[in-house]
Amino acid sequence: MFKQLCRWSVAGILAVVMVSGAYAQPLSMASDPATLAKAALGNVPGAAVVGEWRGGKASYGAAYQGAAVSVKPLVGQEQPLFEIGSISKVFTGLLLAQAVEHGDLRLDDTLGKLLKDKVRLSQPVAAIKLRDLVTHSSCLPRLPGDFAGKSRIKLYRDYDRDSLWNALAKLKLENPPPCEADYSNFGFAVLSELLAERYNKPWELLVRERITGPLGMDDTQQHLGDKATRLTEGHSGSDSALPWEMRAFAGAGGLRSTAADMLKFSSAILAGREGPLGAAAQRLVKPLGTIQGDKIGYAVRILGPESKRTFFHEGQTGGYRSLWMVAPDTNEALVVLVSNGKAPVSNVAHAVEVSRYSVGNNTVAVDAKKMPQYVGVFRVDKKKAFTFVMQDHTLYGRVTGQAFRALTPSAENTFTLPAVGAKFTFSSEGDAITMVTLNQAGRVTAARRTDEPVPSKAKLTSSVLDSYVGQYQEAGNSGSPLKFDVQAESGQLAVKLNAQKRFPVFPVADHPDRFAYDTVKAELQFERDASGKVVALVLHQNSVRRAIKLEE
């Protein structure tokens, strides 16, 4: 069977934030909240509300598109409600931090201990610790196995604690915990239900009694009751989207809130142990591990050095996107709530991060004879690599799944891409360059040189690219024929297969008209007729599939 080319995505690293270019000034935590709201909503229908905390005061801005959407006044108690999705995990993390502070639980408590005589677990699953769950290093998959091929919205609504324990009992892990951190809603559902069982109260009630009630966050709830009419209509792209109702997964993504309430929460976190949440607020943001280049505390993602921390989390459900950021060094907070699951909120998050961790615009001269030493593929892990190619005396770099971009030499063995706040620093063992470290927006990611082949060029001329551009369709297939849309973007080819995401492909050295993907093991061979015109392409991935170029 033909495998989908888009098997995974690279998020956060070297992600060019185009949204900033549309405004007079780059986006930051100090931007006008209405400007941030407009950027977060982008061109999709829905509503966006942004709350900012600065100088001990709150300010708000909103944006909306679509005749069916209205935004209520942003003052008083009638702000619109939004699903905050995975930001709910921060509340679960805080409940655990409180439990540890009170001595009710320990981070090293295991599932085997906590579920003794309740659930029969395999040894690797029984060895999972609370520490592993709250840092996504438990080895649990993103979702239970019985979610596969079923309606997500219905499963979340019906999946209860018994269903969760049954899924744990059936689970077989390939490796014992802890594992390299990998985002898991399953893990946070388990954690929230463990807390609910430990205190013999529903997770929602624990949140109310221990967090939202004391902080006066009256609009932050799982079940809205008479507040349901204030929930802004959700969207998924151009379509309407139903709210997500949750049972066992509430602690992973079930809360609804307002910008005003989330700023109250932010203020309490900024106050630390001296604030209304006491020592648990400080414990919440204490680094416990790493995930995808970020430090992580009790669910909270952490950027930057200790003197300039940024605490944050994003959220997404079917019809909503959200962002929560706190900057203790400047006593600032930012909350972004949007009623469209496909809104470009992550671009806004990255733009703000880049503004806080700028790499500057310094440029130095580099001896051309030294440039080849930087060329190569440097691997982060099985899924991610940094690739560097020299062309026309310029070093180009890219991350797996993204296009090449010209880098600026800024210091010895150091190159930057200021537009996205990225700095690559090469290091050697002996006389050879063997490592490269990416510092970007407060994240640090190291990679080691491999012997993997490097593309022959970073960019091709327009005349060469234009010969490949066009639509290609598989012939003679009575089932589901492959359709390729080949386009030229910034001197490189980008290919969209059927309804999948568009990905760049790169020239294969010493193989004319052949291009390779780097997200999966697959290559495209373009065919020419006797006159030299490109007339077809052949996909090589497990099997061979040929598509004919369609006439314009």
Image (spheres, grey):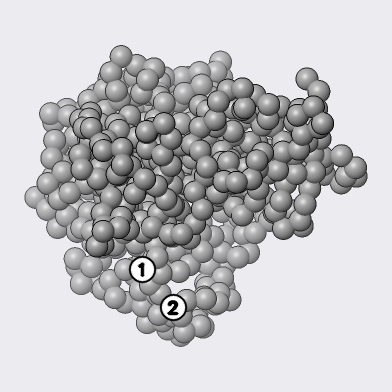
Q: Mark 2 vs mark 1: which is more N-terminal?
A: 1
Q: Quadrant of the C terminus?
A: top right
Name which residue lies at 19% across and 53% down: 281
Q: Count neighbours of disc 1 (C-alpha within 10 A) and say few if under 14, some if 14 to 19, many if 20 or more.
A: many
Name which residue lies at 59% across and 34% down: 494
Name which residue lies at 36% across and 56% down: 447
Q: Nearer the viewer, residue 311 or 175?
A: 175
Instruction: Kindly indicate the quadrant of the structure image that contains residue 244.
Output: top right
Name which residue lies at 90% across and 42% down: 476
Q: Nearer the viewer, residue 485 or 187?
A: 485
Q: Amino acid at mark 2?
A: Pro
Q: Secondary structure at mark 1?
A: helix
Circle 2 is placed at which residue position? Answer: 176
Q: Is residue 478 left or right of residue 501?
A: right
Residue 159 x %, y %:
57, 60
Q: Report how many numbered discs are placed on residues in the image.
A: 2
Residue 136 visible from this viewpoint: no
Residue 528 visible from this viewpoint: yes
Instruction: Kindly indicate the quadrant of the structure image that contains residue 497.
Output: top right
Q: Amino acid at mark 1?
A: Asp
Label 2, label 1: how far apart the Cα atoms are: 11 Å
Circle 1 is placed at which residue position? Answer: 132
